[in-house]
């Protein structure tokens, strides 16, 4: 096992009305919950069993980390709370707190993410300081750091999350000396249009 590589999967406790709220507005709370549970199960199953990295399931609220019944039972996955603060503060925490080694963070609502994507991200960190997986909407579905040098303090502050500026804002906060790699585009499923597009692609 490559215990010096850390994959962090960000997840929200799969409860009705608490996940995928924009998607729920289009397809209903039950439909959004069913999609989220299935995607969380599939992504954690695909990525969490891979011995090339240690997988951490970083969950919110923190209390949900202690409730095993909420989460897919995948061996070797360690559950931790995301901690307090906005998304930027919670994303910064694994880069500071985890044991030495490169860290890659990915969302739990990216149904097409595969172990090959994670392998490529860690591979890119062999030659670069950070790696991003851009999304078509201007955000990103993956961010990783070699952590030598450390990620700058405050990197994920002043980010216009859930807008087309999230990636550009984050890149603007990087030191000019940092080498950055980009993976291919993937999309999270945030609303009904994205959900329908993804379902059509699956059927084709």
Image (cartoon, rainbow, N blue to C red):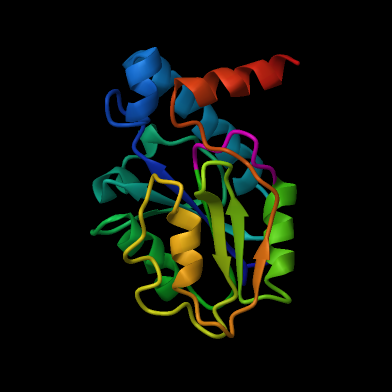
Query: In the drawing, does residue 122 fall left or right of residue 197?
Result: right
Q: Position of residue 137 (x, y in %)?
A: 52, 41
Closer to the camera, 165 or 129? 165
Q: Nearer the viewer, residue 157 or 45?
A: 157
Magenta stretch: includes residue 132:
no
Q: Is residue 79 left or right of residue 149?
A: left
- Tell me: 200 left or right of 109: right
- Count the numbered circles shown: 0
The C terminus lies in which quarter of the figure?
Answer: top right
- Residue found 38% across the figure and 65% down from its top: 156
User: 101 above or below 65?
Assistant: below
Q: Nearer the viewer, residue 108 or 42?
A: 108
The quadrant in which the N terminus is found is: bottom right
- Magenta stretch in the rendered image: 108-114
The residue shown at (40%, 60%) is: 91
In magenta stretch: residue 111 = yes
User: Residue 3 location, x and y as percent?
Assistant: 62, 68
Secondary structure of the magenta portion, mostly?
A: loop
Task: Residue 174: give x, y in percent of width and height.
Answer: 49, 75
**Apparent side of residue 155 relative to residue 135 in the rendered image (left or right):** left
Can residue 137 be seen here? The reply is: yes
Residue 51 appears in the picture as rendered: no
Q: Is residue 44 above or below residue 149?
A: above
Establish if 112 lies above or below 2.
above
Relative image position of residue 146 (x, y in whole percent): 60, 75
């Amino acid at each position: 096992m490559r215990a010096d590589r850390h994959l962090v999967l960000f997840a929200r406790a799969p409860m009705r009305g608490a996940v995928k709220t924009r998607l729920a507005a289009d397809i209903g709370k039950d439909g959004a919950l069913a999609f989220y549970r299935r995607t969380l199960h599939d992504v954690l199953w695909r990525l969490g069993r891979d011995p090339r990295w240690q997988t951490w399931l970083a969950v919110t609220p923190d209390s949900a980390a202690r409730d095993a019944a909420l989460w897919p039972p995948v061996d070797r996955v360690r559950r931790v709370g995301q901690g307090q603060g906005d998304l930027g503060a919670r994303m910064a925490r694994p880069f500071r707190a985890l044991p030495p080694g490169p860290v890659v963070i990915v969302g739990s609502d990216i149904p097409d993410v595969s172990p090959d994507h994670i392998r490529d991200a860690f591979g890119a960190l062999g030659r670069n300081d950070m790696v991003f997986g851009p999304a078509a909407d201007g955000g990103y579905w993956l961010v990783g750091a070699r952590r030598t040098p450390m990620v700058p303090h405050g990197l994920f502050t002043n980010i216009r999350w859930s807008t087309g500026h999230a990636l550009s804002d984050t890149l603007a906060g990087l030191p000019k000396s940092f080498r950055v790699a980009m993976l291919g585009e993937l999309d999270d499923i945030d609303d009904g249009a994205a959900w329908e597009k993804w379902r059509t692609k699956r059927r084709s």
